[in-house]
Amino acid sequence: MTATHCPYCALQCGMTITALGSEITIAPRTDVPANSGGALCQKGWTAADLLTNGERLTTPLLHGRPVAWETALDYVADRLVAIRAAHGPDAVAVFGGGGLTNEKAYQLGKFARVALGTSQIDYNGRFCMSSAAAASLRAFGMDRGLPFPITDLAETDVVLLAGGNVAETMPPFVRHLTGPRLIVIDPRRTATAKLAWLHLQPTPGTDLALALGMLHMVIADGLVDEDYVAARTSGFEQVRTSLASWWPERVERITGVPVARMREAVRALAAAGRAAVLTGRGAEQHAKGVDTVTAFINLALALGLPGRPGSGYGCLTGQGNGQGGREHGQKADQLPGYRKIDDPAAREHVAAVWGVRPDELPGPGRSAYELLDTLGTPQGARALLVFGSNPVVSAPRSAHVTERLDALDLLVVSDIVLSETAARADVVFPVTQWAEETGTMTNLEGRVLLRRQAVPAPEGVRSDLEVIRELAGRLGHRFSAEPREVFDELGRASAGGAADYAGITYERITEETGVFWPCPSPEGPGRPRPFLDSFATPDGRARFVPVEHRPAAEEPDEDYPVYLTTGRVLAQYQSGAQTRRIAALSKAAPEPFVELHPDLAEQLAITAGDVVRVLSRRGESTGLARISESIRRDTVFMPFHWEGANRLTNPALDPTSRMPEFKVCAVRVEKIA
Ligand SMILES: Nc1nc2c(c(=O)[nH]1)N[C@H]1C(S)=C(S)[C@@H](COP(=O)(O)OP(=O)(O)OC[C@H]3O[C@@H](n4cnc5c(=O)[nH]c(N)nc54)[C@H](O)[C@@H]3O)O[C@H]1N2
Ligand SMILES: Nc1nc2c(c(=O)[nH]1)N[C@H]1C(S)=C(S)[C@@H](COP(=O)(O)OP(=O)(O)OC[C@H]3O[C@@H](n4cnc5c(=O)[nH]c(N)nc54)[C@H](O)[C@@H]3O)O[C@H]1N2
Ligand code: SF4
Ligand SMILES: [Mo]
């Protein structure tokens, strides 16, 4: 029996894996705080199927044909050298994933900058955490999803959750929400909203106005925590002035949330001794995601919450290593330890660890969508290496992205299964997955965990770290493929950065069931609550930032009269590459659907179970009609776990985070005759 962690989301629930011959059983651990009661969701319980379902790739593929590892690796290295020689280093791009271990994320960033010499690296976390991350950096000088242990929520009186459906996306999280009064902001009455004390149901894309209106009320009703604002923050006066015109009635008109409901929420938050404001992708995945999160942070600051015990602001990190994956350099503008790639001191430190000159390191590259959008064009890359993402299904305006992928001279995908993206690749590398390898994951609390190997890898597969080592070697660079060695190097590269892992070792995270970063010294503790005394800004104060509401990038009109929003269901994970291959999960969530209100359905003469077509300016998609009172009349919802939903979505980007507007666009819905 091996104690390890789940392959999927950022809760990183603890589980044990017992292998008896070919029989593999999974059980929850009780020593991991995130799922301390010993809970797992259906995906966790059925995860053993990932190891045994016979869908694994076990041999490299070259143009769809099985080949030997050496043949595939030589082919890729030769092509990379040729493309680079003909078009320069930025003609080769890398696309990573927030599901990769810290070791892989770090090594991928180093591989891009040192072995390939390219600035063109970004990852799917751009589609996930980037808006919350940018807003937290701006306000607190640090981005750690929850800047407090998840178990602190038990001490909280009121939790405001904007745009998160944890009852489906992180079911054991709900156990931490049984103490506080829960207020949910979601255009749908989700499983989570049904658990709430109060549900605010705004028009998609209007959270920013809602948050401004709530703060306006806090100020007008004299509920600002003036002592806290004076002692721990800066910039409040500007925000106070900027809110003058956000009258509750105006906010009701924009958001559709009744003034009385808003007031109930504000009063409950202000009356609470301890309260927390949390955001999920619903509030963040917008072309104004950073400002929306900022508006919620301003609200939390005015109420005196961040940096107080049992209180605070946090975002719900999504992918298994969504937190660690955004700290160690697979992001276009970043070096390990959450350093900025354009900061001379950061470049000098990391270059020294890597044994190169600072001026040899490339500068910032393009963000994920911009990288994909330019592939195969004169400005963009001509070769792409993908590790741990399936953009054919998950990128916005996916038919266009797929076209760009097909225009490449070389597409290489490292995956465990033949995903929709791998199926289009020139070369596919079959790699080991979670329980077949050891590595570290940083969960949504910023706790660095050891995910241990529990079963032997199938014959024929190698780890991502081995793939990177072999390619680097062929390009004249020596890289380690030993997870522990890579982690120790990551510790040195991160030392002194915001996300400092220097004091964390495999031994330590075994003994302590995880250590919180920052942890600069092996002798000193990690920091579960880094903001208790001061924030990570130069003056130690949290910053209020004035922000303005604006409409969605695309609002409904005559041709496309309905809002589309997208998201998740319990039994499927992300692009579905893993979970659509698990029988129990496919049975629970077998096909794409379109959720719509009975009034809209009647107007369109649609009945439950009809096949409907959804069209946007980008493309069209189909799904079975699901009719439900729980959604707004002006909005339809589609999960993105199947190819299709993203043919519709709008790649309008947030100006700061470059997050696409996954959560709102305009569509037309038709019954297929
Ligand atoms: N089962 C399952 N669990 C997962 C994942 C998965 O794919 N499947 N993925 C993991 C990952 S990577 C992530 S990022 C997390 C995401 O976790 P969540 O953020 O909880 O997931 P979503 O379903 O994307 O979005 C949450 C809610 O936002 C609502 N919403 C849509 N538009 C708006 C809006 O304009 N405003 C507001 N306030 N709400 C809106 C949707 O109705 C939806 O219920 O889940 C993680 N866990
Ligand atoms: N419309 C819409 N689109 C969205 C979203 C939305 O809410 N709405 N959410 C966005 C968000 S938050 C996210 S996080 C993205 C996620 O979207 P994707 O990046 O597509 O995420 P996954 O489906 O998890 O893709 C991971 C791939 O890596 C493979 N894999 C798993 N483990 C490993 C490993 O160890 N190594 C390697 N090399 N491969 C591995 C899996 O088999 C799978 O093919 O989607 C985004 N797209
Ligand atoms: S909640 Fe997340 S980490 Fe926990 S079992 Fe489910 S998918 Fe795994
Ligand atoms: Mo995500």
Image: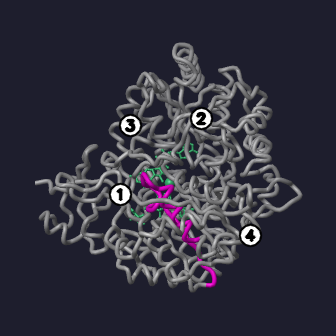
Give the mark, 3 or 1, whose residue is nearer the N terminus.
Answer: 3
The picture quadrant where one finds residue 261 is bottom left
The magenta stretch spans which residues?
Answer: 273-300
Counting residues from the N terminus, which is met first, the one under dot 4 or under dot 1?
4
Q: Nearer the viewer, mark 3 or mark 4?
A: 4
| Among the two numbered marks 1 and 2 on one chain, the one whose residue lies closer to the N terminus | 2
Which amino acid, by three-letter code, is at mark 2? Pro
Q: Kindly identify which numbered label has been placed on residue 401.
A: 3
Tell me if mark 3 has few (under 14), some (14-19) or many (20+) residues whose alpha carbon lies within 10 angstroms of its own.
Answer: many
Looking at this view, name the residue that lies furthest to the right. Answer: 523
Q: Residue at x 47, y 68 (%)?
A: 243
Tell us which disc is closer to us: 3 or 1. 1
Mark seen at residue 532: 4
Mark 1: amino acid: Pro
**Residue position for label 2:** 364
Residue at (77%, 68%) from the top-left corner?
Answer: 533
Task: Provide residue 468's location: percent of width, then percent of height.
Answer: 64, 32
